[in-house]
Amino acid sequence: MVDELIDWDNFENDPFFILNFPQREMLSAQRFQRVAELLKQQAPKTVLQEEVEKIRLELNPNPAGQQQNMPFFEGQQLRGIQHKYDETVLFFPSQGQTCHAYCTFCFRWTQFALNEFKFAMKESDLLVKYLQSQPQVTDVLFTGGDPMVMKTKIFEHYFNALLDADIPHLRNIRIGTKSLAYWPYRFTRDADADDLLRLFERTRKRGVNVVLMAHFNHPRSLQTPAAREAVSRLLSAGVQIRSQSPLLKHINDRSEIWVENWQEQVSQGIVPYYMFIARNAGAQDYFAVPLERAWQIFRSAFSSVSGICRTVKGPSMSTNVGKIRILGVIERNGEKHFALDFLQGREADWVGRPFFARYNPTAVWIDDLQPVPEEPHFFYEEDLTSMTA
């Protein structure tokens, strides 16, 4: 990051500098002042820590109801698993709950800052047992943190446990990672890089796909020789790579950046997958783009690339109820409204079902939207009430 991606001649405005070095404006003026006053007063460390803890708890440390997604199984809550959508189980290996660098927009910042909100689990046998009890699950997603900080021998332990269990409905092992942007050498010159690629090849030969859910916030992260070599080696090993990123003010809130990003990805054999809306946690106020503008950026970029790039879906909000996509702003009965649908939902029946919300030019999240006048509530709210009762 420091040597290859940040432009130090213009670091104040450089997207990779902002992605890695916290800016004063990422805290509200009021919260910044609360800490600054304690520092000026040379307050005891315990007093300062208490105030910092209060501020962290104000920054929505549990977005999208993540704590609700932990299943109960065999009399215990599985703190290292989230199961929100039928087909996909998220697994948080305890050895992968750190990162090569910490993104300033990260919605999982509590993994590193607040132990009571941390998700992590070591037990591969418990993961296997849970998957065996869930025949609708086709995908396991290793997430974090960044699982790619783990050594290959740790991956082998988990992968072998899954493969040796011969789970008939398991089709894909996904890995959510930013390593291709932040440390592509994980796949090229790290001591166990070759072993990792051989593990991926063996997994594919045993009938389970390995899919990297790669995070690229800016096209420059893909344009270094190290990144290109890493992508090439992964594809040669039979690994699929799909790309995703939130839309972020100060980083990539121009359609031209997304056009370049998607075109660069496709040219290297990567499948564009998601454009997300910045989650309502942490420094959301600093990074948030209004929903209408997010849709305009997506639409402008989407219409400027060939069909081979149009695998991407978005702009999407990962909310408590599911991934809600902004289809556009339309006029109904003489008034503007947002048209939306679900790309994923807590109930499979919600997926692909269009619905409408009142137009709000300042809205940055689903919580800022209201149902249209003729509807007392959004269609999914009754089901959600029953589900969470």
Image (cartoon, rainbow, N blue to C red):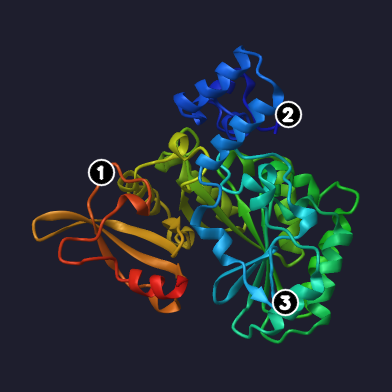
Question: Which one is closest to the eye, mark 3 or mark 1?
Answer: 1
State the mark number for residue 361: 1
Q: Nearer the viewer, residue 343 or 188?
A: 343
**Residue type, mark 3 in image:** Val
Q: How crowded is mark 3: few (under 14 residues within 10 Å), some or many (20 or more)?
A: many
Residue drawn at point x = 71 percent, y = 84 percent: 132
Task: Identify residue for label 3.
Answer: 208
Q: What element carries label 3?
A: loop
Residue drawn at point x = 50 percent, y = 20 percent: 33
**Residue type, mark 2 in image:** Asp
Q: How crowded is mark 1: few (under 14 residues within 10 Å), some or many (20 or more)?
A: few
Given contact means CB atoms under 8 Å apart, are the residues at marks 3 and 2 in contact? no
How much space separates mark 3 and mark 2, taking CA atoms?
37 Å
Task: Identify residue for label 2.
Answer: 3
The image quarter in which residue 206 lies = bottom right
The image quarter in which residue 83 lies = bottom right
State left or right for residue 321 relative to residue 100: left
Q: Is residue 347 visible?
A: yes
Query: Of callouts 2 and 1, which one flags the residue occurring earlier in the amino acid sequence?
Result: 2
Q: Residue 239, image x and y in percent?
A: 71, 65
How much space separates mark 2 and mark 1, taking CA atoms?
40 Å
Query: Of callouts 3 and 1, which one flags the residue occurring earlier in the amino acid sequence?
Result: 3
Q: Nearer the viewer, residue 124 or 290?
A: 124
How much space separates mark 3 and mark 1, taking CA atoms?
45 Å
